[in-house]
Image (spheres, rainbow, N blue to C red):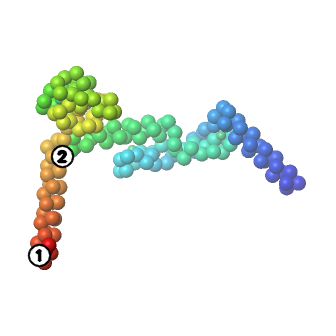
Amino acid sequence: MEAARAEVSRLEREAAAATCAEIGHSWKSIGGCNAACENIDCGCSVPVHECEVCGDCDYGQNAEADEVKRTCTEQMMLDEPDYENRACDVCGAKTDDEAGKLCKSYQLPSGDYACNGSPEDESYPDGRLRFLSEVGIAGINAWVDEMVAAHEKTATDSPTETE
Ligand SMILES: [Zn+2]
Ligand SMILES: [Zn+2]
Ligand SMILES: [Zn+2]
């Protein structure tokens, strides 16, 4: 009797899996989870779905999650104070598109255009060129100074080190 019941439920599960394989899962929302965005501080959440037929779970990996992550990454790029949108010093282009038509542009493997006025390779999601801002440059300079200072300190800390 137990064996028969087990066999029935096995067949039911197989039938359900076959139905899902053929027509796709019948997802229903069972709550939410962290979106696991690139920006770990963002707190975005996405719906988690469970299939009503076979009981499979998508663990929050769905089209809605992709869209949440894409929007979050866009916002993160737009909010980054180290970068700003301005016209290229060399050709005056303000967007990838303009850089593609104006002087000194070259096409990146991604298909985007950049120019020798050296915008960041990655433009904003809307195609505007991205350059380091004064804040960003100051940050890099401070980091370089720190590295140099640390190097000099190491050099003076170990005066016995000779060839
Ligand atoms: Zn299913
Ligand atoms: Zn997010
Ligand atoms: Zn340019």
Q: Residues within 10 Å of mark 2 (few under 14, many from 20)?
A: some
Q: Nearer the viewer, residue 156 or 35?
A: 156
Q: Nearer the viewer, residue 151 or 27?
A: 151
Determine whether, in the image, residue 160 is placed left or right of residue 65: left
Q: Nearer the viewer, residue 88 or 160?
A: 160
Q: Nearer the viewer, mark 2 or mark 1?
A: 1
Q: Amino acid at mark 2?
A: Gly
Q: Position of residue 44 (x, y in %)?
A: 41, 45
Quadrant placement of the C terminus: bottom left
Name which of mark 2 and mark 1 comes first in the sequence: 2
> Would residue 31 be visible to someone looking at this image?
no
Q: Which mark is residue 113?
A: none
Find the distance from the CA under tag 2 to the CA under tag 1: 35 Å
Which residue, as the protein is rendered here, is positioned at the far top?
101
Residue beneath the point at 68% across and 33% down: 22
Quarter of the image where ligand 3 sits: top left
Report the residue marked by disc 1.
159
Q: Position of residue 99 (x, y in %)?
A: 22, 26
Report the residue marked by disc 2.
136
Q: Position of residue 18 (x, y in %)?
A: 71, 38
Q: Which element type, helix, strand or loop, lies under badge 2? A: helix
Which residue, as the protein is rendered here, is positioned at the far front?
163
The answer to which quarter of the image holds residue 74 is: top left
Q: Amino acid at mark 1?
A: Pro
Q: Residues within 10 Å of mark 1 (few under 14, many from 20)?
A: few
Quadrant placement of the N terminus: bottom right
